[in-house]
């Protein structure tokens, strides 16, 4: 396949998945519900926490910065953090315990009932994300999963799961960012 055909195919696939999301009223309602929960959480002085692996970790960090920095509006910062940004902590816990414990131990230390954890895993089976969601749920936090269409282990520990209708990791991640940006814009508009 030529380079231009590959680009064209990727764009068509991305558009097709986004059109599926656009026509899924239940999924759109979930996104709206998540936005409302985040607004209420910030009004109650809670923290918005994110976790993921690889590209999903990068997406988690990107979304956390949109809340803690700014999105469109010049406004007060909102407490939002990606749990993987302390590399000394990650490497110490991975070495001393297990990589699958990295997020759950941090949730145990900093999570409270007023907080929300968004776990991003295209497969829904990332062990460290699943354990984090389980820990967060046990502490009374609201848990939100961003996944692909497949049923994953994460589903059992989420109050809300946003399933992008695809099995293609890059396309799923693109949609996670679009959904995350939409949530950020809604929250910012509601609070400011």
Image (spheres, rainbow, N blue to C red):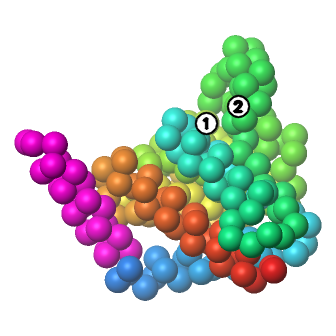
Horizontal placement of 186 versus 25: left or right?
Answer: right
Residue positioned 53% across, 45% down in the render = 56
| Vertical arrangement, residue 169 with respect to residue 90, above or below | below
Res. 117 image quadrant: bottom right
Q: Position of residue 91 (x, y in %)?
A: 71, 19
Residue ID at (43%, 61%): 175
Q: Which mark is residue 186?
A: none
Q: Quadrant of residue 69?
A: bottom right
- Residue at point 31% right, 74% down? 20
Residue 128 circle label: 1
Tell me if I can see residue 158 in this picture: no
Mark 1 surroundings within 10 Å by alpha-carbon count, few (fewer than 14), some (14 through 19), many (20 or more): many
Q: Residue 172: percent from the left, percent from the top?
A: 39, 55
Q: Position of residue 183 (x, y in %)?
A: 62, 71
The residue that disc 2 covers is 102
Look at the image and give the residue range highlighted in magenta: 1-21
Main SS of residues in magenta: helix
């Amino acid at each position: 396949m030529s380079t231009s055909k590959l680009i064209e195919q990727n764009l068509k696939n991305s558009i097709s998945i986004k059109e599926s999301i656009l026509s899924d009223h239940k999924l759109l309602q979930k996104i709206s519900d998540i936005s409302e929960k985040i607004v209420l959480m910030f009004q109650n002085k809670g923290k918005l926490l994110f976790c993921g692996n690889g590209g999903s970790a990068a997406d988690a960090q990107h979304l956390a910065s949109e809340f803690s920095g700014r999105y469109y509006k010049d406004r007060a910062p909102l407490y939002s953090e990606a749990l993987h940004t302390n590399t000394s902590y990650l490497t110490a816990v991975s070495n001393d315990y297990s990589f699958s414990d990295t997020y759950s131990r941090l949730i145990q230390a900093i999570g409270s009932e007023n907080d929300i954890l968004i776990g991003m895993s295209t497969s829904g089976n990332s062990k460290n994300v699943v354990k984090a969601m389980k820990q967060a749920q046990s502490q009374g936090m609201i848990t939100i999963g961003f996944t692909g269409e497949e049923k994953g282990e994460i589903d059992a520990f989420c109050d809300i799961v946003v399933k992008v209708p695809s099995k293609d990791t890059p396309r799923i991640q693109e949609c996670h960012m679009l959904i995350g940006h939409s949530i950020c814009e809604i929250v910012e508009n509601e609070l400011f």
